[in-house]
Image (cartoon, coloured by chain):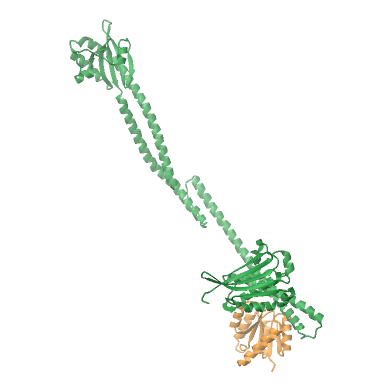
Chain colours: A green, B orange
Amino acid sequence: MRMSFQRKLTILLAGIIIVVFSIMGIFMASSRISELRNEIVNSAEMFVMLSSDRIGDAFFRYYKNAFFKFRSIVMSHKELNRDLKNIQVVDLRGRIFYDMEQYEKGFFDTSRPKYTSDKFVLANVKKMEVNIHKDNNVCIIAPYIDEYGVHNYSIVYYFSLGRLNQELASVIVSSVAMALATVGLGIMLSVVIARRITGHLKILSAGAKRIAQGDFNLNIDIKTGDEIEDLARAFNFMSERIRENIRELNNLIEELKQRDLQKTQFLANISHELRTPLTASLGYVDYLEKGKMGSLNDDQRHGLGIIRRNLERLNREIHSLLLISKYTLEGVKLNPERFDITESIEAIIHDFTPEINRKGLFIEKQYKEKKVYADRNGIHTVVENLISNGIKFADFGTKITIRTDHISEGDKETFQFKISNHGPTIPLDQIEKIFEPFHQVDATTSRRHGGIGLGLSIARNIIEAHGGRIWAESKDGITNFYFSIPQRRDL
Amino acid sequence: MNKNILVVDDEDDILDFVERVLKDAGYIVFKAKDAKEGLAILRSEKIDLLLLDIMLPEIDGWQMMQMIKSDEELKKVPVAMLTARVDAYDKIIGLKEGAVDYICKPFTADELCKRVNDIFYYMEKNNL
């Protein structure tokens, strides 16, 4: 069970108070009892000393002739000590001549001799000094010496310790009452204190929660002048620091974004600037090749061909750069329509025929689905990049397989394109990275295969804009590239 | 009758190439290096087609197009944009603004000739 700090603190404080008061009560009671016992015994002894001679005299003088005078003297003494229970006059053999208690109750029969059964009395009745026995009662035996100096009788006093029990009870009652009152007061006080402390803790915990939720505009106002205030101040300081750090980070992010934008803008501008000189160059090369500026010999034609191919390659790369910076700046804009993708594939294969023939490649086509609903230009670019990639990395004289397919999975309809080639295996840790801009598996491949590695990144941008997925698998010298695009069922 | 074509582009080599190709195809070619020069020629000569680069110094191709389209005398001159931008979006803006065609750089001699021929063929067919 979850218990709040406040309740725990209250229970703890109440427990402490009860324990302290119980110990105090016990201590007070015990000291009070022993004090009282001493008091009773002392006053009893005193009483015995003062009264024994007078009672003895009265017995000696009046018992036989004026019993009622004797009795009244005894009774008047009895009034003087509230603990006194009984007075007996016992002779040296233990015979009781007078038993106040019995007599007053009317049980004392003087006609038959009665002997004491108290062993202490029997043992001490002959002694010449005062003897005290403490039991449940206090018994004191005082010898009486008559005017002839003879010890014939002893006076036996019984004092009750009953007052102790009363006193004990009242001490217990008062200390319990005090404990209860204190616990009540203590609980109230501890609730107040705990509420003060936990109230502040609650404010702090609410503050911490706000920080956790990302709200750093925190200013906890607690003025207690103690550790709680220090804690609150530390909280405020912390949130301020976090606020500052976030502000700095945001500035930094803004700056980086700005720089990234500038970079992309720069890339777009530079691509544009590069394209203009290409136009003139490509235009003239093309014009020259066609013999419109005079006839050419084979060597010149061969040279012009090399110039043209390289200019075209340069143009493709610049186009890629422009495209990727445009996608980064503006996102991919789609204009989807339903069209025959195999037309695109065939046109692209046609464009790559010289390269396919140079490497002695065989293209196997598996068109299981021809129609796709997508942006025609975008998909053309993707397929062009994937085919160009496949040809670029295919081993000489191998087969490239291109497959188009329609896949129904539950209520999802997707178009899937796959191209496989035989060539170098892409390491597993690189297979995701190849779709990042400017990435090729290693620096040497870019030297060997040319290109600045934007094709796959552009393809990913286009496919993801369609809500589709592009991925690669590479194992044992066979590399497959796939893309899939969700299709609307009604089309 | 030979058609008069004005080419506005800030690149000498492009102007040179376009002039050469179009002259070989039988057109009369006027060249301008910026919008001001282009507007002056538009006013002094009877121009049948304007090939206009978008990226021009000071007044760019869009601004020049707007100036032409808001000028009673000049607004009938058909304009074809020349640009290195790859953007379909630019193309749509260009056509909306009143361009009759849109030729992307780099273009080959054949492409340029064919596009220009097509524009004139289309205009004649529709009696524009």
Most distant residue in the top direction: A148
Residue A476, horizontal then vertical, whole percent: 68, 64
Q: Quadrant of residue B36?
A: bottom right
Placement of A299 over or under A36, stated as above or below:
below
Camera sees residue A328: no
Residue at 52% across, 51% down:
A235
In the rendered structure, the answer to whether residue A413 lies left or right of residue A323 reads: left
In the rendered structure, the answer to whether residue A358 lies left or right of residue A191 reads: right
Residue at 80% across, 83% down:
A296
Camera sees residue A36: yes
Q: Quadrant of residue B122?
A: bottom right
A150 and A391: which is toward the camera: A391
Q: Quadrant of residue B40?
A: bottom right
Residue A293, horizontal then vertical, whole percent: 78, 85
Residue B39, horizontal then vertical, whole percent: 66, 85
Placement of A304 over or under A480, stated as above or below:
below
A341 and A168: which is toward the camera: A341
Placement of B124 over or under A348, stated as above or below:
below
A100 and A213: which is toward the camera: A100
How many marks on residues? 0
Residue A453, horizontal then vertical, whole percent: 68, 68
In the rendered structure, the answer to whether residue A466 lies left or right of residue A300 reads: left
